[in-house]
Amino acid sequence: MATRHETETGPHLLVVIDHQEARVYRTEVRGAVPERIAPYDPHGHGRHLHSANEWTDGKRPAERRSYHEAVAKALQGADQILLFGSGTGRSSAMDQLLADLKDHHADVAGNVIGSVVVDAHHTSENALLARAREFYAEYNRK
């Protein structure tokens, strides 16, 4: 009998996201260069996308919406997606992305197998990928 991993055809992706950038890695490819997705920033200020007031009226700023759309596009065709981010609750870019995927890209959201809070700014790329590969190995043994 084939294992879950043997029957899959699409990539396993890791998304490391904050309010300034999303990095999308193919975890099964060693030495892969991540696809980097940054929010629309017409003035080059490198600003964060969150503010204390942005959730109060139920509307998202256009730049966050376009950011999440770009990330969702990069995730199309993946069999499994793992999200890494820092922060929790409304300040978490990871939680905001996941909510947006569920609302607007149910097909992509259905392939998210986990979300993990990490200190991505103080963890090396190799360590993030190793942790993701361990997560996938454990998940696919089930």
Image (cartoon, rainbow, N blue to C red):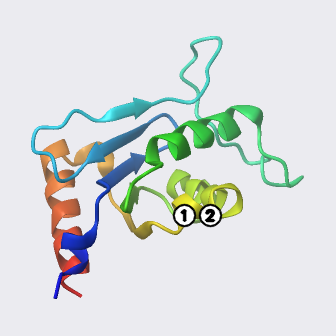
Label 2 secondary element? helix
In the rendered image, which residue does mark 2 sit on? 106
Mark 1 crowd level (few <14, some 14–19, many ≥20, 10 Å Cα): many
Residue 115: name its quadrant.
bottom left
Three-letter code, disc 1: Ala
Relative side of 129 to 73, left or right? left
Residue at figure coordinates x 11%, y 38% from the top left: 31
Residue at figure coordinates x 13%, y 47% from the top left: 126
Q: Nearer the viewer, residue 7 or 61?
A: 7
Residue at figure coordinates x 80%, y 47% from the top left: 53
Q: Relative to 21, does residue 123 appear above or below in the rendering?
A: below
Residue at figure coordinates x 54%, y 56% from the top left: 92
Q: Which residue appears farthest toward the right when viewing the image?
A: 57
Q: Position of residue 106 (x, y in %)?
A: 62, 63
Relative side of 2 to 34, left or right? left
Mark 2 crowd level (few <14, some 14–19, many ≥20, 10 Å Cα): few
Q: Position of residue 136 (x, y in %)?
A: 23, 69
Q: Which residue appears farthest toward the front when viewing the image?
A: 1
Name the image quarter holding the C terminus.
Answer: bottom left
Marks 2/1: CA–CA distance: 5 Å
Label 1 secondary element? helix
Relative side of 38 to 40, left or right? left
Q: Nearer the viewer, residue 61 or 45?
A: 61
Name the image quarter holding the N terminus.
Answer: bottom left
Residue 69: name its quadrant.
top right
Q: Position of residue 80 (x, y in %)?
A: 36, 63
Which dot marks residue 109? 1
Which dot marks residue 66? none
Three-letter code, disc 2: Ala
Assess whether mark 1 and mark 2 are in contact (beta carbons under 8 angstroms).
yes
Relative side of 117 to 48, left or right? left
